[in-house]
Amino acid sequence: MQFCDDCGSMMVAQGDQMVCTDCGTAADKDAGLSEAYESTEEQSTDDVIETEEGANFEGKPTEETKCEECGHDEAYYTFKQTASADEPPTRFFKCVECGHRWREYN
């Protein structure tokens, strides 16, 4: 994987060059890297955070916390690492009663 020196975005292989997916900067493929580059058309869903309405929180642990929408005092929660590894994880909540979702940064 190669990243753009100008903006830091991921670059993709296009012929003999690597092209930035964000700013369009082109650079020759690094000679020290493997010649096998892999480009993907779209993001995989493996690292997508559960944000859709139908995401299943049921069965996850619960905690006593107040929902700002309905005032209920219990919510499911799950952790996701949304920043670099040296930062604490983000905790995502879903109210047991009304289904309202929110996040908490530690």
Image: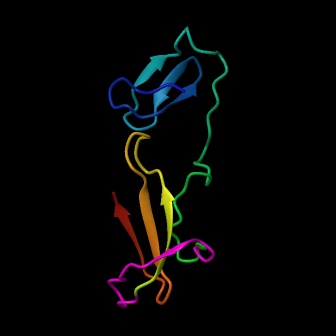
Between 86 and 47, which is closer to the camera in this rendering? 86
- Residue furthest to the top in view is 31
Which residue is at 62% across, 40% downward? 40
Q: Position of residue 84 (x, y in %)?
A: 41, 41
Q: Residue at x 36, y 64 (%)?
A: 104
Residue projecting furthest to the front: 64
What residue appears at the point 61 percent right and 73 percent down from the top-left corner?
A: 56
Residue 26 is situated, as x and y percent measured from the top left of the image, at 43, 23
| In-image side of 46 versus 87 (left or right) | right
What residue range appears in magenta?
Answer: 57-72
Task: Based on the picture, tell me whether residue 17 belongs to the magenta stretch.
Answer: no
Using the image, determine if residue 65 lies above or below residue 39. below
Q: Quadrant of the C terminus?
A: bottom left
Q: Main secondary structure of the magenta part?
A: loop
Locate residue 20, reporting x and y percent: 44, 31
Q: Is residue 65 above or below residue 10?
A: below
The residue located at (45%, 27%) in the rendering is 3
Q: Position of residue 45 (x, y in %)?
A: 61, 54
Note whether 13 is above or below 33 in the view shown: below
- State which quadrant residue 102 falls in: bottom left
Q: Quadrant of the image for the N terminus?
A: top right
